[in-house]
């Protein structure tokens, strides 16, 4: 098969009716994951900052923060 034939078969119709619905479903399923990840990052940042203020050392601060925030 020629290269042009493969290119014609691989063209996707982005204006198809199901495309919008699929994108909406993908976005809605990713929102809870994004919220959870953002909360974890904020927790890790706060705990590591507090640990660093107490110890004035960078050694093990992030490991401790990740362990506390992830349960």
Image: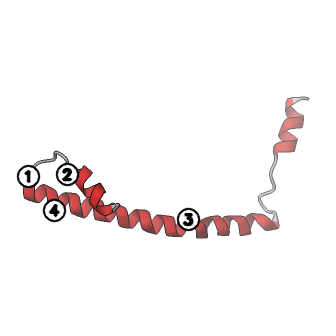
Q: Secondary structure at mark 1?
A: loop
Question: Which circle, 2 or 1, is nearer the viewer?
Answer: 2
Disc number placed over residue 30 in the picture, else none: 3
Q: Secondary structure at mark 2?
A: helix
Q: Which residue is mark 2?
A: 61
Nearest the viewer among 67 and 62 is 67
Looking at the image, tell me whether mark 1 or mark 4 is earlier in sequence order. 4
Whole-angstrom CA distance, mark 2 to mark 1, is 10 Å
- Tell me if 37 is positioned left or right of 11 in this view: left
The residue sitting at 79% across, 66% down in the picture is 18
Q: Which residue is mark 1?
A: 56
The residue sitting at 81% across, 56% down in the picture is 13
Whole-angstrom CA distance, mark 1 to mark 3, is 37 Å
Q: Secondary structure at mark 3?
A: helix
Answer few, some or many: residues within 10 Å of disc 2's Cα (few below 14, many 20 plus, some between 14 and 19): some
The residue sitting at 42% across, 62% down in the picture is 37
Cβ atoms under marks 1 and 3 closer than 8 Å = no
The residue sitting at 26% across, 60% down in the picture is 45
- Tell me if 2 is positioned left or right of 51 in this view: right
Looking at the image, tell me whether mark 1 or mark 3 is earlier in sequence order. 3
Whole-angstrom CA distance, mark 3 to mark 4, is 30 Å
How far from the left and from the top, in percent, is residue 34? 47, 65
Disc number placed over residue 50 in the picture, else none: 4
């Amino acid at each position: 098969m020629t290269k042009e034939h493969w290119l014609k078969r691989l063209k996707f119709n982005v204006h198809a009716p199901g495309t919008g619905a699929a994108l909406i479903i993908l976005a809605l399923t990713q929102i809870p994951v994004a919220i959870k990840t953002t909360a974890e990052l904020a927790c890790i940042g706060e705990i590591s900052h507090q640990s660093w203020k107490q110890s004035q050392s960078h050694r093990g601060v992030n490991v401790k923060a990740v362990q506390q925030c992830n349960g």
